[in-house]
Amino acid sequence: MSLYLYPKSKLPLREVQKFILIFYTVGIIGFLIPYTKNIFIAITPFALLLGTYLLAIYHKPYSKKVLAVLLIIFTVGFLAEVIGVNTGLIFGDYSYGSALGIKLFDTPLLIGINWLFLTYTSVSIISHFFKKEVLIVFLSSFLMLLYDFLLEQVAAKMDMWSWQGSEIPLKNYITWYFFGVLFVALLRVVKVNTKNPIAPILFAAQFVFFIFLNCFL
């Protein structure tokens, strides 16, 4: 089963990919202009949901097993953040701002979506270049870690989250990598198909987006 919703049912893939590039280019400009920064912070949750929606409609095939694995990644990722932000035991001492939207137990629901988004897109990219499972697992997790490293440097400025004392602990990156390995391995063991034509360009657009914000925000 696959989903044929807009824009997949109406627009050529090339047009959707072009839209993604334009969307994140506008996002870069919007965050760098002081007068529009707060507006773009406010629409951050919608940007993440849009990217996830596009991944979903270009994914195939769907099955109960695939949906169960995606739900597990979302749930475990969210619960890890709930425990982490409320105890400081997993990632370190941090707190969430308002940019990621609705919170449950002081944790944005979208953070589970973010874990799912990053795991899926990273595997999609790495599995295109490598076939050995051990390389896919560890390199996909490393790609997730690189993404997190870029994001961490600007997260506070984007009102996503902030660290106590403004220092990012090494423990955060170690634990991030651990969960990355866990989630990627789960996708591979269950053989979830991540050959998605939208995944690489979405990941790349976000990666470049955070590079620009690191340089100029």
Image (cartoon, rainbow, N blue to C red):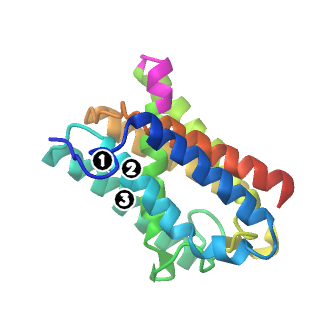
Q: Over which residues does the magenta segment extend? A: 125-132
Which tag, 1 or 3, sits closer to the chain's start?
1
Membership of 129 in magenta stretch: yes
Residue indicated by mark 2: 54
Task: Say whether residue 211 is left or right of residue 198.
Answer: right
Question: Image height check: is 80 above or below 135?
Answer: below
* Image disc number at residue 124: none
Q: Are marks 2 and 3 in contact (CB under 8 Å)?
A: no
Disc 1 secondary structure class: helix
Question: Image height check: is 8 above or below 112?
Answer: above
Can the viewer see residue 123? yes
Q: What x and y, as percent, mark residue 59?
A: 30, 41
CA separation in Å, label 1 and label 2 = 5 Å
Membership of 148 in magenta stretch: no
Give the class, few, some or many, for how many residues have Cα within 10 Å of label 2's Cα (few <14, many ≥20). many
CA separation in Å, label 2 and label 3 = 17 Å
Q: Nearer the viewer, mark 2 or mark 3?
A: 2
Disc 3 secondary structure class: helix
Kindly indicate the quadrant of the structure image that contains residue 65: top left
| Observer-nearest of 140 and 198 | 198
Q: Are marks 1 and 2 in contact (CB under 8 Å)?
A: yes
Which residue sits at x=53%, y=47%?
Answer: 20
Which tag, 2 or 3, sits closer to the chain's start?
2
* Dot 3 amino acid type: Phe
Residue indicated by mark 1: 57
Residue indicated by mark 3: 74
Q: Quadrant of the C terminus?
A: bottom right
Q: What x and y, as percent, mark residue 216?
A: 85, 56
Q: Nearer the viewer, mark 1 or mark 3?
A: 1
* Dot 2 amino acid type: Leu
